[in-house]
Each structure stands twice: as C-alpha cells, then as structure tokens.
Image (cartoon, rainbow, N blue to C red):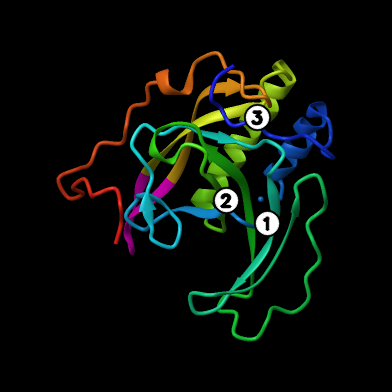
Amino acid sequence: MSNITAFSTAGLPSVSSLSSALRSIETDASASGMVILKMDRTGHWVFGADQTEVEDNSIWAINPFSFVHGYIAWGEGTVLAEKMVSVAEPLPEVDAPPSGAKRGWEMQIGFTLACTNGEDEGLQARYTTTSVGGKKAVQELATAIAAQVDKDQNKPVPMVALQKEHYQHKTYGRIHTPVFNVVDWASLNGDTASDAAELEVAADEPTSEEPRRRRRGA
C-alpha cells in the first residue's frame, strides 16, 4: 500500500461505466471545500487565494469519477453563476445568462485531484477550464482514462505531473496551455506500480525570459 490518496466509491457507478462517460467529454467538463487549481497567464500552476505555486516534481492523483461539464458565467473577475453536472449526465439546461455576464454562458469542464507527495501531500483541488487549450488537455486526459479502464479496470486513477506547453499567437504573443502528463496508474485504494515519492518527473525548465519564481506567490 502506498501513500496515494484513496477515493471513495460509495454511491458511484461502477468502474466499467467510466469508459463511456469519459469519452462523452470528446463531444461536449462543482466541488466545495477544495482549493482552486489553475495555470496562470505566465504558465505557472498555482492554487488557492494566495496563488501558491505547486511544487516541482509533485504528482497528483485524478479522481476518475469527478469529471464534470456544464456552464459558467463570469462578470468582472467574479463568477456570477455556474451549473455543472457529472459527465455521466447530459449538459445542464441554462436560461438567459445573468445580468453583467461579460461573455454569456461559457462551456466549462473539469475534475478534482489530490497531491500525493511533497509539502502539499493530501491537498485536494478542483480544476476547471473554459479555454480551448484547457479543454483539449482535459479531453485528452479523459480519453486516456477511458482507454486505461478498457485495458485494466483495477487501476483507473491517473497519476499526473502538472506541466505545460505553449504556442505563439500573432496578436497575444506566447500562450501557455496545460499538460497532464500521466506518469503512472493507481487503484481506487491507492495501490500503484510505483511509489509516488519514487516517480521521476522532468520539471519544466525556466527560460531566460522566465526565471524560476519563489514557490509562494504574492
């Protein structure tokens, strides 16, 4: 038994039902009491109100039953409304967007995850996204989980390193997009082929224009 976070399956569908539910994200991704994880505009993974940077080489376990999809309406830096459901359910119906919504209803997908090593071990977080790059990364992760479930239902939990890639936009310059690099698979009870502390992950190296920042963001 490793120190990987175990996920409860009480009241959840069988692991075998994950495949079709996760694949539905390809055509279409709320949790309380968790920190919000996101990639900031400079390409750093941060969480919480203090925008704390994740540790280098940290490994995160994705809860395969936590994938959600739905809609969100943003005001001026504030969430005005949000309607999210499990990907096993149809997209929720929405009425007219709330007054002040800058872009109306935007489709959003996401999931929950837990850090398995380092200073943030045990931290549970929620990741959601409306961006094209973010949704593409979640879709690719969901497809990988579905393929893994088809192959081995005993280890449906992806252990991922939070990484990034970028492309050059002719108007906005360098755009960073998230990458969920699957480095191992674990059971719902936390058993994995490798101990999380022993998994080696190649950290994203800073460029000359992007010096390494202190882990605790201001």
Amino acid identity at mark 1: Ser
Front residue of this view, candidates 52 and 203? 52
Q: Give me the C-alpha separation between circle 2 and circle 1.
A: 8 Å
Amino acid, disc 2: Arg
- Mark 3 lies on residue: 145
What residue would you read off at disc 1? 30
Q: Name which residue lies at 59% across and 85% down.
A: 100
Q: Position of residue 3 (x, y in %)?
A: 53, 25
Amino acid identity at mark 3: Ile
Q: Tell me whether the residue at label 3 lies in contact with that at label 1, contact meaning CB atoms closer than 8 angstroms.
A: no
Mark 2 burial class by Cα count in 10 Å: few <14, some 14-19, many 20+: many
The stretch in magenta equals 166-177
Q: Earlier in the sequence, mark 2 or mark 1?
A: 1
116 relative position to 8: left or right: left
Which secondary structure, mark 1? Answer: loop
Asked if the stretch drawn in magenta spans residue 7, the answer is: no
Residue that numbered label 2 is attached to: 126
Residue 12 percent location from the top left of the image: 82, 38
- Toward the bottom, the furthest residue is 99
